[in-house]
Amino acid sequence: MPDASFDILIVGSGAGGGTVARELAPLCADGVRIAILEWGARLRKDEFTGREVEMAHRLFFESGGMLTKDRAMTLAAGRAYGGSTVVYTGTSLVMPRRVAERWGVPGLEWDDIERRSAKYAAENKVHSLPPDLQNDNNRLFAEGCRALGWKVEQFPINVDGCRGAGVCNLGCPNLAKQGTHRVQLPVAEQAGVEVITNAKVERIAEGECFVTVRDPGFGEPSPWAPGEYRVRSKVVIIAGNAVQSSALLLRSGLGADLPALGRYLTLHPALILVGEHERPLSNTAGHPKSFYCDEFLESAGFLLETCMYYPFTTAKNLIGFGAEHSQLMKVFQCHQQILVLAIDPPRVDNRVTVDKRGEPVVDYRLTGGVLDTLHRSMIAAAEVFFAAGARRVHVPAGERFFIGAEERDRLEELIPRRNVRPGQISVSSAHLMGGCRMGADPGTSVTDVWGQVHGYPWLFVADSSLFPRCSEVNPYLTVMALADRVAERIRDRREELLSS
């Protein structure tokens, strides 16, 4: 088994790993050796084809089809140079003050999160898109919400030179999205940080990581030849995403010392709803996610957002099959789509475990309260569709495949709560949070307020697994803010951590 040696190892290159690498990179000038171990590939520009199934295979864990243990939810997480920042829409919101207060982590103040979030919003060129890139799908959502008297706001997004390809979730083919692959990682590499792609970290121990490098058959070749490696390091920072980070620490044997490890997972359960209009819409061109409505966030626990997914993703989220399913897919150009996101509570029994091979198992149950929330959100989304002029809508819990506009006054009857059952509705998640939550008590948390794992002074976590509970908004900027804190703490403890 070949050996390699570094001072600092970072596992993962997304919002957390990329940020930590960028902030620690100046240490390379003083001779500190830093490396990123990224499980995914570094794709060439011409490999961002926009072809749905091909890009899902190249850029996501399990092609975007990771399932919970009960197979009731689909989980999506990026696996690439740049992690999930390559495959999300770029929405960049600062976590609200109320969320930080609900987290209740001693020593973590919202003002600090807001300041650090603003730093990365500026660095990643976050701004609101002009109206010419707001397509019909987005415009109709805003019009429908306003017609109902509901407040609607525009998402700030991290793009530069957006050409409206509309395939943000498949990796921008025009390199407009300012994820870590475009901003933080190139800066870190220029300063001397080494990035090893196609490198899966199998387990860690004090002072070393055990890594397998494979050739996936696409992307730039890894700097290391395929094989198994033992990599020595004085400091290890885990930033692989909530599921993979928890699984890595569990298969490394840390669960005995950390009873909260893998627990308190929240997933922001989501549904895709479709409204059909009489005429074709501009829905696949232009940025897919321009507006959101948080009218019901505090009262009912859900968000409504614009979205536009691709044919395969849309088809698998429709309920049922046969003639009606085919009819709706044949008029894809007439679709308006809405994404609903439910705020789920942190529960000790919603958790990541590992199987006999050390692979993650997501043991997560949708609570009755969350199912109530999803029910209310479906009715609200249907109201928006009809207010925007849709002729009929498809709702996952509907009594029939289609609900017509003439039936809009019967939504409570036609979308009954009894139909909102795990396994009957197609629930997904792209916001994986928790598992290595921050806190002061080692019995109920995994790290301290600076991301250091309790009882392991050489080990840190810097991704959304740190979240004590759901962030309520897209976690991107919050992850970067917390990773910035991790980097600061490592710099402050540099002599202690790196002198041995």
Image (spheres, helix red, strand yellow):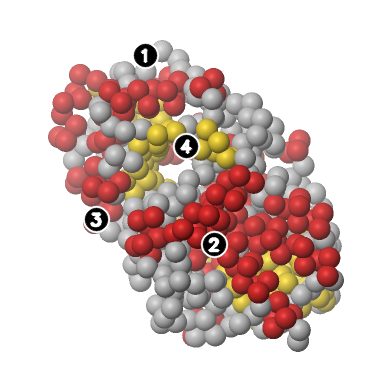
Outermost residue toward the top in this view: 279
Residue behind mark 3: 369
Q: Nearer the viewer, residue 407 or 373?
A: 373
Identify which residue is drawn at 19% across, 46% down. 418
Residue behind mark 4: 155
Q: Quadrant of the C terminus?
A: bottom right
Q: Residues within 10 Å of mark 3 (few under 14, many from 20)?
A: some
Gap between marks 4 and 2 measured at Cα: 21 Å
Q: Residues within 10 Å of mark 1 (few under 14, many from 20)?
A: few
Which dot, 4 or 3, sits closer to the camera?
4
Q: Are marks 1 and 4 in contact (CB under 8 Å)?
A: no
Q: Earlier in the sequence, mark 1 or mark 4?
A: 4
Residue 181 position (above or below residue 400) = below
Q: Earlier in the sequence, mark 4 or mark 3?
A: 4
Q: Amino acid at mark 2?
A: Leu
Residue behind mark 1: 278
Residue 319 appearing in the image: no
Label ID, residue 482: 2
Q: Are marks 3 and 1 in contact (CB under 8 Å)?
A: no
Q: Amino acid at mark 3?
A: Gly
Residue 218, horizontal then vertical, whole percent: 75, 47
Q: Nearer the viewer, residue 418 or 499?
A: 499
Identify which residue is drawn at 19% across, 23% down. 407
The answer to which image quadrant residue 46 occupies is top right
Q: Residues within 10 Å of mark 2 (few under 14, many from 20)?
A: many
The answer to which image quadrant residue 295 occupies is top left
Residue 111, horizontal then vertical, whole percent: 46, 58
Gap between marks 4 and 3 measured at Cα: 27 Å
Residue 439, horizontal then vertical, whole percent: 44, 74
